Image (tube, helix red, strand yellow):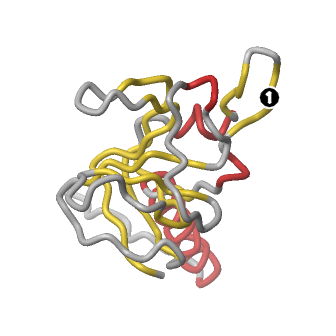
Amino acid sequence: MTLPTPISLSRRAVLGLIAGAVVAFDGHAALADASLTFDELYGKVSVLGLEFSTKVKSLAGQEVRMRGFMAPPLKAEAAFFVLTEVPMALCPFCSSDSDWPDNIVVVYLGEKQTFVPPGQTIEVRGTLEVGSWTDPETGFVSLLRLRSSQFYAV
């Protein structure tokens, strides 16, 4: 019976394996929790309207995080709000997807949370949903949504 030969690794090889593991772990974490900015939402605007960017299409169905401002909620106990690129005094929710501004995202909360003042920067984490959708309860139309979301003040 022969014993297995011990593996001999040089110091350089060990350091390379450690560096590779760190890169692989960071890459996995980045895929599981990608950031998205308002400037990255749309690729172009044509006569047919806004066209989603490649990044948005690739992140559909995945957890993303975004920073922005909470538009004033329509109701004190709503389970959703509108995330805006800039602080707003009024909710920008539109009546149709053809009027949809290019710098808002609807956020549906996983559970009720206390809202923050409109001038407070927040970070939201949720699952990105892409495409026109009408909320059956409110009748609001949206193009981009974050589902099962949580937010916190930055």
Front residue of this view, candidates 14 and 99: 99
In the image, residue 153 above or below residue 92? below
Residue at the spot 39% in from the left edge and 32% down from the top edge = 140
Front residue of this view, candidates 67 and 58: 67
Residue at the spot 65% in from the left edge and 49% down from the top edge = 103
- Answer with left or right where residue 31 lies relative to residue 36: left
Q: Quadrant of residue 99?
A: top right
Q: How many marks?
A: 1
In the image, residue 10 above or below residue 125? below
Assign the N terminus to one quadrant of the image.
bottom left
Q: Position of residue 48 (x, y in %)?
A: 74, 15
Residue at the spot 55% in from the left edge and 48% down from the top edge = 92
Front residue of this view, candidates 88 and 120: 88
In the image, residue 1 above or below residue 60? below
* Residue type, mark 1 in image: Val
Q: Position of residue 74 (x, y in %)?
A: 35, 52
Residue at the spot 47% in from the left edge and 69% down from the top edge = 123
Q: Position of residue 152 (x, y in %)?
A: 37, 75
Front residue of this view, candidates 10 and 26: 26
The residue singled out by tag 1 in the image is 45
Badge 1: residue crowd in 10 Å (few <14, some 14–19, many ≥20): few
Q: Position of residue 87 (x, y in %)?
A: 60, 68
- Answer with left or right where residue 70 lies relative to residue 84: left
Q: Quadrant of residue 6?
A: bottom left
